[in-house]
Structures are given as structure tokens and as C-alpha cells.
Amino acid sequence: MGATTPNIDLHRLPHHVAIIMDGNGRWAQRRGITRVEGHKRGKDSVRAVVETSRRLGIKYLSLFAFSTENWQRPRREVEALMGLLRRYLRTELRKMMKNEIRLLAIGDLTRLPPALQADLQSTIDATKNNPGMTVVLAVSYGGREDMVQAARKLACDARSGRIDPEKIDARVLDGYFSTAGIPDPDLLIRTSGEMRISNFFLWQLAYSEIYVTETLWPDFREIEFMDALAVFQQRERRFGRILEHQEAEQLRAAR
Ligand code: IPE
Ligand code: IPE
Ligand code: MG
């Protein structure tokens, strides 16, 4: 293990961390440079969190790279983002293979430029048997759109008799989302201070711990990531229950 890991208990890491990588534009604006320059710097933060996750042993990392709504941005910015993503895939493939990282992509990929679709597919194919960690790239992704496609597939399966509507429960429905087979995120990180989900995972975040930091995405590197993990480890996850010692107290009082 390279760097130190202060305040982190390596035995209690989240299995799945999801990140809304926000604030590239503001980072650039503050420096009087173009928004695209902010996105370029954001790429280095992606590299940092992927490497840190892998080194620590986090099994799933989901990165919200481009939302359904982001298609409404000026064409030049959209094109620049697509170009950056393509370059990222090309430069990182060797490292993904070396570090045994598997790449998955979720979202409406049919809207992406064909060259990017091809690069994504070839990276997914090349890395599909890598056992070290899974990076889920959410691109052209929207939580509602994911729900809609899940509902549509489920309805088709019901119509064709592949599934009995009476047998649909949360587990069955979960299998129709683009994240089927991936555990729900334990931790959601959002950079740049915004207190919203912005149509990221809606179904999957039911019991995720939420960590929002003012740090802008291009400034979010290993130390900031470690801080988020340390805060996560201080959280008390109750999942609607009461804690063991409270339960014991109640039992004592009832006697
Ligand atoms: C996040 O940074 C990157 C994407 C949404 C693609 P932004 O571009 O949203 O940066 P701000 O929020 O305008 O600062
Ligand atoms: C969320 O950021 C989407 C991504 C980080 C990819 P946005 O910048 O698009 O979200 P809003 O517009 O502030 O809600
Ligand atoms: Mg933003």
C-alpha cells in the first residue's frame, strides 16, 4: 500500500461508493479559464478516486459523468465532454488492465457519438473479466429514465408471460434496473456543495449515507476522498431499526 490511510478502518469500507462529480465549471470560472479546462482537471480527480478506491479495496465505484439533463448544455461543452471521456478511456485502458478494473457503463448510450460508443464498448469488453474492482460510469444517465426503462421491460415480460405480476417484489424490480447485480451504494458523495440528487440513482440510494462537500470536483483528490470515507465510518447506519444497546435498555425497562 502506497500512501498512508489516516483515520480509515480498512475492514469497514463501503462496498459501493457513488459520486456526483460536480463543480468543474465553477472551478474554472474562479480562475478565469474556460469551463472545458475545469472538466480537463476533473479527469485527474477521476483518476485519483479510481486509484484510491482500488488501493483501499473498495469493490464498486459509480461515477456520474454526464446526466440526461446535461444534453441541454451548449453543444461545444457537450462535444468537449464527449472528447474528454473518449481520451480518458484510451489513456486509462492499460492501467485498468494492470489494476484489474472492470468498466461498466449505464445510461442511454445510444445518444453518445458513435466513436465514443465504440470505445466504451471495446473498453467494457476488454475489462469484463477483471476481478479487482468495478467502475460504473453513468453517462447520459438519468434516474427517472432508468426507472422508465425498468418499468417498460418489466411490463413486456409480464405481457409475454415471463413474469407473474403477483410475484413482483423489490428484489425482482431491482433486477430490471441498469444497476442489476450491483449492490446499492453505501455512500453517496457530491462535490461542490449542492444539496440535491440531480436525477442520479433514485431507486438505488434508498439507504445510502450522503456526504456533501464544498470542495469542487477538480480539487477532490485522495485526501478529500479519505475524509469522506472517515466521515462515513463515523455514521451510525440504522436502516430504520433501533440500536442494539437501545434495544437492550428497552428490554430491561420492560422487565
Ligand atoms: C460537473 O461539473 C460536470 C458535469 C456535470 C458534466 P459542472 O460542469 O456541472 O460544474 P458547475 O456545477 O457548473 O460548477
Ligand atoms: C449533476 O451535476 C450531473 C453530473 C455531475 C454528471 P449538474 O451540474 O448537472 O447538476 P445541477 O444542474 O446542478 O443539478
Ligand atoms: Mg454542476
Image: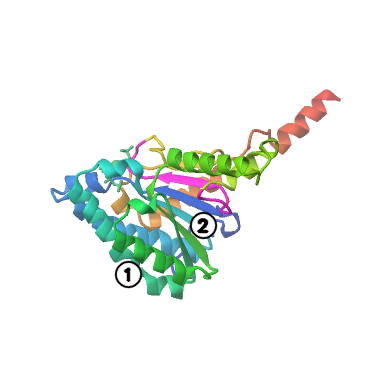
Marks 1 and 2, how far apart at CA: 21 Å
Q: Name the residue under label 2.
A: 60
* Total count of labels: 2
Quick check: is the Cβ at mark 1 less than 8 Å away from ligand 1?
A: no
Q: Residue furthest left?
A: 32
The boundaries of the magenta stretch are 178-194
Mark on residue 90? 1
Neighbours of disc 2 within 10 Å: few (<14), some (14-19), many (20+): many
Q: Is residue 237 left or right of residue 49?
A: right
Residue at horizontal 56 percent and vertical 43 percent from the top: 156
Q: What element carries label 2?
A: strand
Q: Where is residue 171 in the image (x, y as percent from the top left)?
A: 64, 44
Q: What element carries label 1?
A: helix
Q: In this view, does 182 lie to the left or right of 251?
A: left
Please say whether residue 182 is one of the residues in the magenta stretch.
yes
130 vs 44: above or below: below
Residue at horizontal 49 percent and vertical 51 percent from the top: 17
